[in-house]
Amino acid sequence: MQRRVEGGRSAGIAGACGAGGRRRAGRAFFIGVLCSMCATGCVSFDAAGARREQTRSFTNDLARLESEWLAEPLTLDDCLRIAMTNNYEVRKADLDARLGRFSRDMAFSAFLPQVSASATRIDYRKDPVLNSQRFTSGGVDVGLALLMPSTWFLYDEARHGRAAAELAAGYVRQGVALQTTSAYYDVLVQEKLVAAHERQLAAARETASRVSGLEREGLARPWEKDQAALLEETRAAELDAARRRLVVVRGDLMRALGLSPLADFSLAPPLEADEPSPEPLEELVLRALERNPQLPIADRQVVMRENAVRRAFCEFLPNLSVFGQWSFTGNEVMNPPKRNFDWGFKGTWDVFNGFRSVAQVRAAKAERRQAELARENVFLSVMAGVVSARAAVEDAAAAAAVRRRAWEVAAGKAEDLSGRAREGLEPVADALDAEAARDLAEVEMLRASFTERFARANLDFAVGENAP
């Protein structure tokens, strides 16, 4: 029986020769294939169990982070620090920047020698005991590009792509900072609104009780009693709505921080400081053109399209490379073994795709022009964004001043009419209307203060200065 076996299977199959060798060899081969399939086959998946395990692991991680980061009242700086570490968009942008670095490294590998090696061993056995031969062969191939201009432009394009990814990560961080700032002030304002509604409800209950007593004594009309009761019911409904809204905005802040929306936390009040007036519009626009990361990203895109034009032009040029090959062949009969080493230069020149290469150059030039137009559009968008953001700051500041003044006037009127109504000098209905107007003015004042703070944060974002 003449058999040819290769690799690690030769010893096992040769030992199985003789009486019953075929059967044992076939059985061993079947068992080996079965074990290999079991080891490298598809992984079983229990959907319900996997979901329970993932839920348990994720909630445990969130609980651990909450115990570390939410033990003390959070300031705005604390929120920004946590968001820059744990926010999903920030982490994804950092991974995108890492992928850009990997792309650059892979492009650089085109400048390195390309090495490949191979080896073969064959055992030939005519008689398992008396006669056998062994054949061996191997080789190493080395190639290095000498003149391949397109690789330089590919590498430079990958390098600019990495820089653009890092700039994009910075821009994402600025956006997350704006989102976190907005959510932080939204929670603070909503907490103040809840406290205001609680005070308003307590005052409305007191007024309703007093008017009910006056109605029993004949000093107030029944509809005035109903009006006071309606005001109490309205304030109770507004308080419930404000509390539900507070739960929502607290969840939004925690989501911006990458934590559970159900987490329990408290916020430290911000330091009260006089907000300075915005700088002149021309200075803000010039600083935005220097610092806003959208423009450097657009610049990188233009450079990458320019490299694409040059790479397309390189299709007309030949590619030169140097190569070396070392090979080894031998067996137990051949002595000495045969060894060879060859080296030389190799050149390739694609001369039959001229029309396609010309079209590629024209297409690359058109894409470069598109990138230039996109940069011009970003340029104008940044300028318009600064103009709009600065106008929004001025509008919000003026509105906040008016709302504060309106609340002061309404509070003074309500206090005066309530005192005169207690003395019987003014109708109770007028005092109730004045109290309702005061409460509404207070709510509008708090909302206007939030709008002003957010408008200033949005102006910093438009200029590119709110990066933590």
Image (tube, rainbow, N blue to C red):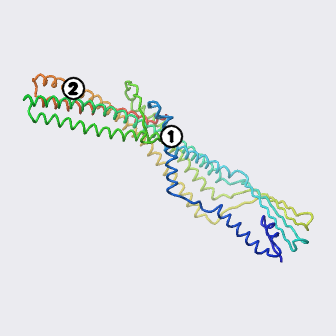
Q: Position of residue 42 (x, y in %)?
A: 60, 62
Identify the residue at horizontal 68%, vertical 51% (top origin): 109
Task: Name the residue nearer the viewer: 217 or 122.
Answer: 217
Upstream in sequence: badge 1 or badge 2: 1
User: How far apart are the alpha carbons under marks 1 and 2?
Assistant: 45 Å
> In the figure, residue 459 lies in which quadrant?
top left
Q: For the residue labelled by badge 2, is the local secondary structure a helix, a strand or a loop?
A: helix
Q: Is residue 344 left or right of residue 297?
A: right
Identify the residue at horizontal 63%, vertical 58% (top origin): 315
Q: Position of residue 7 (x, y in %)?
A: 78, 65
> In the figure, residue 433 lies in which quadrant?
top left
Residue farthest to the left? 218
Residue type of the residue flagged with mark 2 = Val
Residue type of the residue flagged with mark 1 = Asn
Q: Which mark is residue 86?
A: 1
Whether residue 19 is visible: yes
Identify the residue at horizontal 45%, vertical 44% (top origin): 378
Q: Is residue 329 left or right of residue 348?
A: right
Look at discs 1 and 2 and give the one toward the viewer.
1
Q: For the residue labelled by badge 1, is the local secondary structure a helix, a strand or a loop?
A: helix
Whether residue 293 is visible: no
Q: Position of residue 184 (x, y in %)?
A: 40, 35
Q: Which mark is residue 102?
A: none
Q: Is residue 227 left or right of residue 350?
A: left
Cβ atoms at labels 1 and 2 below 8 Å apart: no
Category of crowding for the residue at label 1, using alpha-carbon neighbours closer than 10 angstroms: few (below 14), some (14–19), many (at least 20): some
Task: Name the residue nearer the viewer: 360 or 79.
Answer: 79
> In the figure, residue 16 lies in which quadrant?
bottom right
Residue beneath label 2, please?
409
Q: Position of residue 203 (x, y in %)?
A: 22, 29
